[in-house]
Amino acid sequence: MIIVMSPGATEQQIEAVVRKIAEYGCEANISRGVERTIIGAIGDERAINQELVDAMSGVEQSMHIVKPYKIVGREWHKDNTVIDISGVPLGGNTVQIIAGPCSVETQEQMDTAAKFVKEAGCRLMRGGAFKPRTSPYSFQGKGVEGLEIFRRAADAQGLPIVTELMDIRMLDTFLEWNVDVIQIGTRNMQNFDLLKEVGRVNKPVILKRGMSATISEWLMAAEYIAAGGNHNIIFCERGIRTFETAYRNVLDVTAIPVLKKETHLPVIIDPSHAGGKAWMVPALARAAVAAGADGLLVEMHPTPCEAWCDADQALSPDELKALMAELGGIARVIGRDI
Ligand code: PEP
Ligand code: MN
């Protein structure tokens, strides 16, 4: 950590800072300039309480040198992490497309959806049994029955399943139904108790970006999961809130290269919740693959206009098939496959 003292800082104030960082087990390297003194804290700077240092008299500002996200950061882990999702690799050369309806509705709907997901060439399936809806009067999801329906439909096609966990109390049930990937939704990205709990299990976790979260907050949220021992984390950008009202959210494509630089973990994109309209999905999906996303989370419904949730953004089975062909072309250009 570097601590910049104010121009008029006294010797006593400088000494007090040196004593404080020694309390945290760090040594001080003092550099006296004409106008200011700069103190370098040498040692494990993560132990230093930055707020306390900033509050000391004579301190103008302090900054960390090493990244606070030590497990998920690339600093200490140079190679890309490939996550094994029940035999399907995510984060390697193959771009994985996770498709399926917004929500689990009926056995027939899920059976049909699973068949189309498989036919399109996708290796993983999505579907929400517990839905975080803006209104308490909207369909809240089928709950545990939805997990059962989903598992049955996906098993028939040999597809691992991705589904959202909203409540810690449901974690054991998710494990009983052998959910392959636990999704943490945008509204729960900073639900720290939930993050700690999924950090204790050994299941891959998709951590969606909070709709107004910075990259740094998102990385720190992932670090919560990793700190518990679960390093199987997949980042999912799903669009952020901005001043723009012409579409549901703004897909932050910039987050892809930035995250790829900051973390060794896979990064996927949800073009469906970003645009909020089915017709926008192909363009956003193509952009995401071209920009280096390791996968996509796409909503597809056997009959979109009948979907109980997010009907407007669901691709039809034919549209998903057409998109897969296009994405294959883009992936090949950048040396990857689908
Ligand atoms: C979802 O993927 O079903 C979902 C609710 O997404 P988000 O958390 O990104 O809104
Ligand atoms: Mn949805």
Image: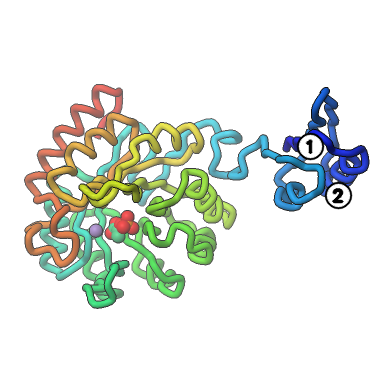
Comparing labels 2 and 1, the label whose residue is closer to the camera: 1
Identity of the amino acid at label 1?
A: Met
> Compared with residue 14, is residue 202 higher up or lower down, i.e. above or below?
below
The residue lying at 39 percent from left, 41 percent from top is 267
The residue lying at 9 percent from left, 57 percent from top is 304
Q: 338 or 305: nearer the eye?
A: 305
Disc 2: CA contacts within 10 A as few (<14), some (14-19) or many (>=20):
few
Q: Which mark is residue 23?
A: 2
On screen, residue 125 versus residue 227, left or right, reads left
Hey, which residue is sitting farthest bottom in the picture?
137
Residue 85 spot, x, y in % from top left: 37, 49
Quadrant of the rendered image containing residue 120: top left
- SS category of the residue bearing label 1: strand
Q: Which mark is residue 5?
A: 1
Please report whichever mark, 2 or 1, sits nearer to the chain's N-terminal start: 1
The residue lying at 62 percent from left, 44 percent from top is 68
- SS category of the residue bearing label 2: helix
Quadrant of the rendered image containing residue 100: bottom left
Q: Which mark is residue 168?
A: none
* Quadrant observed for ligand 2 in the rendered image: bottom left
Residue 111 spot, x, y in % from top left: 14, 62
The residue lying at 52 percent from left, 55 percent from top is 225
Disc 1: CA contacts within 10 A as few (<14), some (14-19) or many (>=20):
many
Residue 282 spot, x, y in % from top left: 17, 39
Number of marks in picture: 2
Tell me if residue 93 can be seen.
Answer: yes
On screen, residue 166 versus residue 121, left or right, reads right
Identity of the amino acid at label 2?
A: Glu
